[in-house]
Image (cartoon, rainbow, N blue to C red):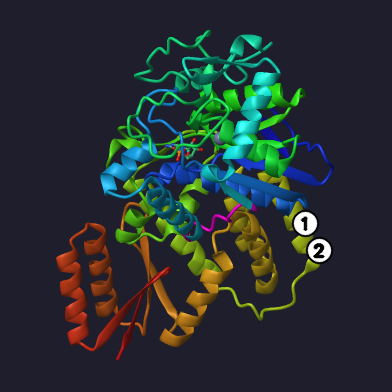
């Protein structure tokens, strides 16, 4: 595959240190609140990348940290402790907060078909390894102690600004508000490896260390966790674009200085999901979550579909209208797949193999997921027998993970129970409903009216219509492909 590499600013052939094996690391969530759907855009795209590499035949070892300590509300080594903020907000201990939001994160991931990495390591579980690495950096002359804290000395590096010496956007994300000067630092970019002088009176989690009781800096956890589970040579490091600086820059500084050799050649950064009024942020209070999408009646996989329709290296603007369009297209796609007959013919292996090659050519070009989705539509138009078409789509879905064939099978079963699909009707703004019933234009019209009312969020009117139909002995069922009605 060809992948854009943030470290070289070029699209390059993907390579690995050990042939056939990918050591992959992903920066995990900071578990002081629910993940917002922007965070989850990053995890969806990283999930597709992992699955695509497996699809190409690589054996992937994927590692992720859980940041449950020492992460401050500013990305510099200043600001308020986010975990502590969460604990105060909810009158719980920091560890209770961490456990609750870690579970919530993986529950959201499951709803979005995001596979759990092979190893998930909470930072609080590996403090001795962090201390070891900090000691190693001190021993090798890359760190110094000042004012009770241990700092990394960036002046000892031949090159520090790995990602943003050319890239304007990376430069911008590196600029943060409210960064306070730390008088202990010898150089502007130096950063803390270990704190013993907490600015927080009530710092909750502290550990003993050779430099006194304290806690690790933010960046050391990823370097040490990756070293333990991926080994000395990492092939691919992932994260959102905001992680490039200072977090990933500092990870490289630590790891390479500690190891004494180049560490990770390939860096994959997902650009942000923004709203019309700017960047999404957990610390801003109200934010968009998977639960909110569900409350509003969206299938979380419609959000995954929405993400896959655009390229990971472009900022993506979220709006309800954009999501509606994606949700409508996703429902229609499932209805089209449901209309295929699994017993129609035998799978043509030659077609399946040729389709695989086509898919790899498209998606293997810098993870072009929108072409991956297009390949599904192409398969539907290819004119093969239905069994082959379903096999091709099922094969693509190993990477896309949109539950296409599973949802289609469920819909097929439901449709068999309830009757043939009668019509798919547009209800404006790209949305549509599929009406499955016994064929009665008056009922179809009311079903459509109810769908329009729901879309306009006139829920009382929608309920009124449902009751009106119920009074006529007609039951409605909302399915992924639209509304199904039957006389009871
Ligand atoms: P955090 O929980 O803040 O540590 O972030 C988890 C992941 O989400 C990191 O990889 C971030 O870079 C990424 N991220 C943060 N905000 C966004 C956003 N608006 N869009 C996409 N990814 C994001
Ligand atoms: Zn990290």
Spot occupied by residue 298 in the image (x, y as percentages of width and height): 37, 59
Label disc, if present, on residue 350 of the rendered structure: 2
Q: Residue at x 66, y 39 (%)?
A: 226
Q: Nearer the viewer, residue 472 or 66?
A: 66
Q: Secondary structure at mark 1?
A: helix
Badge 2 crowding class, 10 Å Cα cut-off, few under 14, some 14 to 19, many 20 or more, is few
Q: Can the viewer see residue 269 in this picture?
A: no
SS majority, magenta: loop
Q: Where's the N terminus, which quadrant?
A: top right
Q: Tell me: 85 left or right of 227.
A: left
**Residue 401 x/y as whole percent:** 58, 58
Give the quarter of the figure containing the C terminus: bottom left
Residue 2 picture quarter: top right
Identify the residue under disc 1.
354
Q: Are marks 1 and 2 in contact (CB under 8 Å)?
A: yes
State yes or no: Cβ of the residue under disc 1 lies below 8 Å from any atom of ligand 1: no
Q: Which residue, as the protein is rendered here, is positioned at the far right?
A: 19
**Would you identify the image quadrant in which residue 3 lies?**
top right
């Amino acid at each position: 595959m060809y992948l854009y590499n943030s470290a070289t600013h070029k699209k390059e052939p993907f390579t690995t240190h050990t042939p056939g094996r990918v050591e992959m690391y992903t920066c995990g969530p900071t578990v002081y609140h629910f993940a917002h759907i922007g965070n989850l855009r990053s995890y969806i795209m990283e999930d597709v990348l992992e699955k695509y590499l497996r699809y190409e035949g690589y054996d992937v070892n994927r590692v992720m940290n859980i940041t449950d300590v020492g992460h401050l509300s500013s990305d510099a080594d200043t600001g308020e402790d986010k975990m502590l903020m969460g604990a105060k907000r909810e009158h719980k201990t920091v560890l209770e907060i961490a456990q609750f939001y870690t579970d919530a994160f993986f529950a959201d991931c499951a709803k979005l078909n995001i596979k759990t990495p092979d190893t998930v390591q909470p930072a609080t579980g590996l403090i001795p390894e962090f201390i070891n690495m900090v000691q190693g950096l001190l021993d090798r002359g890359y760190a110094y102690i000042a004012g009770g804290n241990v700092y990394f000395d960036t002046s000892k590096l031949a090159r520090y600004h790995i990602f943003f010496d050319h890239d304007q956007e990376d430069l911008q994300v590196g600029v943060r508000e409210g960064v306070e000067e730390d008088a202990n630092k010898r150089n502007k970019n130096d950063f803390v490896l270990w704190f013993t002088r907490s600015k927080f009176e009530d710092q909750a989690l502290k550990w003993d260390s050779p430099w006194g009781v304290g806690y690790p800096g933010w960046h050391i956890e990823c370097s040490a966790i990756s070293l333990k589970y991926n080994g000395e040579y990492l092939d691919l490091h992932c994260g959102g674009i905001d992680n490039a600086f200072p977090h990933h820059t500092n990870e490289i500084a630590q790891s390479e200085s500690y190891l004494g050799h180049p560490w990770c050649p390939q860096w994959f950064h997902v650009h942000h999901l923004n709203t019309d009024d700017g960047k999404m942020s957990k610390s801003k209070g109200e934010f968009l979550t998977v639960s909110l999408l569900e409350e509003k009646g969206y299938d979380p996989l419609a959000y995954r579909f929405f993400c896959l329709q655009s390229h990971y290296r472009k900022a993506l603007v979220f709006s309800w209208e954009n999501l509606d369009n994606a949700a409508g297209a996703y429902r229609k796609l499932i209805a089209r797949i449901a209309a295929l007959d699994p017993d129609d013919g035998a799978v043509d292996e030659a077609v399946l193999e040729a389709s695989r090659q086509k898919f790899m050519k498209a998606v293997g070009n810098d993870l072009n997921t929108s072409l991956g989705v297009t390949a599904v539509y192409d398969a539907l138009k290819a004119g093969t027998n239905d069994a082959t078409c379903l096999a091709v789509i099922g094969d693509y879905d190993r990477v896309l993970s949109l539950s296409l064939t599973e949802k289609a099978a469920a819909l097929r079963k439901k449709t068999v129970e309830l009757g043939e699909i009668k019509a798919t009707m547009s209800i404006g703004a790209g949305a549509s409903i599929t009406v499955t019933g016994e064929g009665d234009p008056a009922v179809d019209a009311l079903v459509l009216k109810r769908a329009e009312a729901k879309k306009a969020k006139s829920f009382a009117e929608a309920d009124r219509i449902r009751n009106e139909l119920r009074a006529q002995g007609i039951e409605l069922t909302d399915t992924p492909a639209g509304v199904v009605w039957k006389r009871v």
